[in-house]
Amino acid sequence: MTATEILMIAGMMAVTFGIRYALFALAGRIRMAPWIEDALKFIPPAVLTSITLPAVLLPRGAWDVSWSNPYLVAALVATAAGAWTRNLLATIAIGLAAFFLFRLLVPGVTF
Amino acid sequence: MNAAAPLHARRQELLAGARDTFPLLLGAFPFGMIYGAVAATSGLTPAAVMAMSAFVFAGASQFIAVGLFAAQTPVAIIVLTTFVVNLRHMLYSATLLPHLSHLPQRWRIPLAFWLTDETFAVTVHRYGRPDPAGTRHWYQLGSSLAMYLNWQLWCLVGLLMGSRIPDASGWGLDVAMPITFIGMILPFVKSAPMAVCVLTAGAAALATVGLPYKLGILIAAFAGIGAGMAAEKFSRARAQALRP
């Protein structure tokens, strides 16, 4: 490992662990306002959606809203599979299978 | 208090946490491979590729950092981007806080280090269920260990493959992250305010996609949380008005 790599990894580890641990470190000494407790349940779907939608509609950093975008097709299939089966494993397995089947069967899709 | 809990109850929670995380291990497997494969061709030494997985353990930010490193971005910018991308974990820890505040630091430190989107999404449902033996944190530990070991394994496989198969990074394995996240989002969307939250967060994420350092993720998350809370307030007020 080079010095730059060590510096980068140490810095990334420090900020990542700091973010994950800061509140746990203080737990018991801070009390949350009721409106914050109301907000908590919205956190996971809001965060996950804000990562997911751009990854699907701009898979290579550029807009691609078309049926030739395998990321979009796989996301739609996964959403349908999830809504229908209500099973996490089925959602992920069917979504991944749709992606690779699409890439295999639809020629001309390049990356 | 957990010293009094019988051994089998703790082991049961540990195994249940790992088992319930299994679908997410499937999603993390292609994502870990693509990270390893991309990192192998980014100019990072193999030791650094694995050290990042072992010590940072945050898939999305590792993926972004490797891309920035390959583009010769200064270390300070890479660390700043990591900070912004991972700030969402503070929202997760805020959610788990009431359930972990009774635990000693020797529990809080490792559970914080291993806190990922996946373990959070699985564990938050467990914390919503009863816990007669007081052993729920063993469930989170089981999920954490499963995610951690799985991530190291597939990063290593990706690293070994990536240096042998030159175009492994073009396979599109990065699709695994959005697919996995869709599976994690769906169980939350059970009410109108939740739907408002998700739709707003998605629209805001698309509107802010051009911002640097992935700042849009946080802005969109807060937009979604605010919209969800407003929608809930509105539906409560309406329910009250309709009451005779």
Image: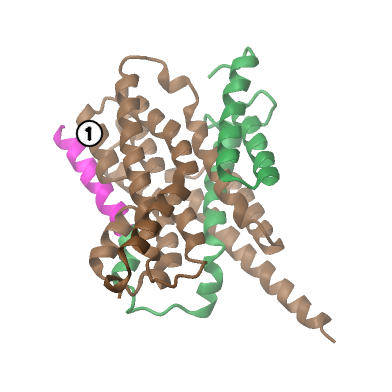
Chain colours: A green, B brown
Q: Determine the residue positioned at 32% across, 34% down.
A: B153
Q: Vertically, is A7 above or below A30? A: above
Compared across the picture, whether B68 is left or right of B3 comes to right
Magenta region includes residue B227? no
The location of residue B170, given as percent across then percent down, is: 46, 20
The location of residue B102, given as percent across then percent down, is: 33, 75
User: Which residue type carries mark 1?
Assistant: Ala
Q: Magenta region, mostly helix, strand or loop?
A: helix
Q: Quadrant of the N terminus of chain B?
A: bottom left
Q: Chain of mark 1?
A: B
Q: Does residue B208 appear in this view?
A: no
The location of residue B147, given as percent across then percent down, is: 37, 45
Q: Determine the residue positioned at 77% across, 77% down.
A: B239
Q: Vertically, is A81 above or below A109? A: below
Compared across the picture, whether B13 is left or right of B206 comes to left
Instruction: State the image quarter where residue A5 is shown.
Output: top left
Instruction: State the image quarter where residue B232 is shown.
Output: bottom right
Q: Determine the residue positioned at 32% across, 70% down.
A: B5
